[in-house]
Amino acid sequence: MDPSTTGSPALSVALAVLAVLLALTGFGIYLAFGPPSKQLTDPFDDHED
């Protein structure tokens, strides 16, 4: 039998959740440090007295 077809559904769900978590983490790092970060402003500098 093929071991990939006899696996537990819980393993598939766990791997899918892990993949989504890693994708969101990578996207957040890209937004924070990549080219889109040039458009971010510091709110503390905007309201300095």
Image (spheres, rainbow, N blue to C red):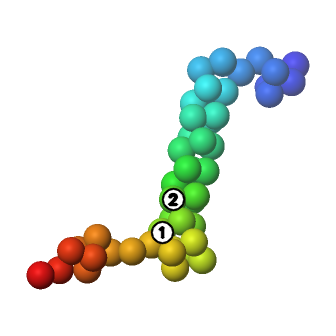
Q: Residue at x 48, y 69 (%)?
A: 32
41 left or right of 37 in image: left
Where is residue 29 drawn, in percent x and y? 51, 65
Residue density around tag 2, few if under 14, some if 14–19, many if 20 or more, within 10 Å: few
- The residue pinned by badge 2 equals 28
The vertical placement of 21 against 41, above or below, is: above
The vertical placement of 26 against 11, above or below, is: below
Q: Residue at x 12, y 81 (%)?
A: 49
Q: Amino acid at mark 2?
A: Gly
Q: Residue furthest right?
A: 1
Q: Amino acid at mark 1?
A: Ala
- The residue pinned by badge 1 equals 32
Circles 1 and 2: CB atoms closer than 8 Å: yes
Residue density around tag 1, few if under 14, some if 14–19, many if 20 or more, within 10 Å: few
Q: Residue at x 80, y 27 (%)?
A: 4
1 left or right of 35 in image: right
Where is residue 15 drawn, in percent x and y? 62, 35
Q: Residue at x 81, y 21 (%)?
A: 5
**SS label for mark 1:** helix
The vertical placement of 45 against 6, above or below, is: below
**SS label for mark 2:** helix
Q: Quadrant of the N terminus?
A: top right
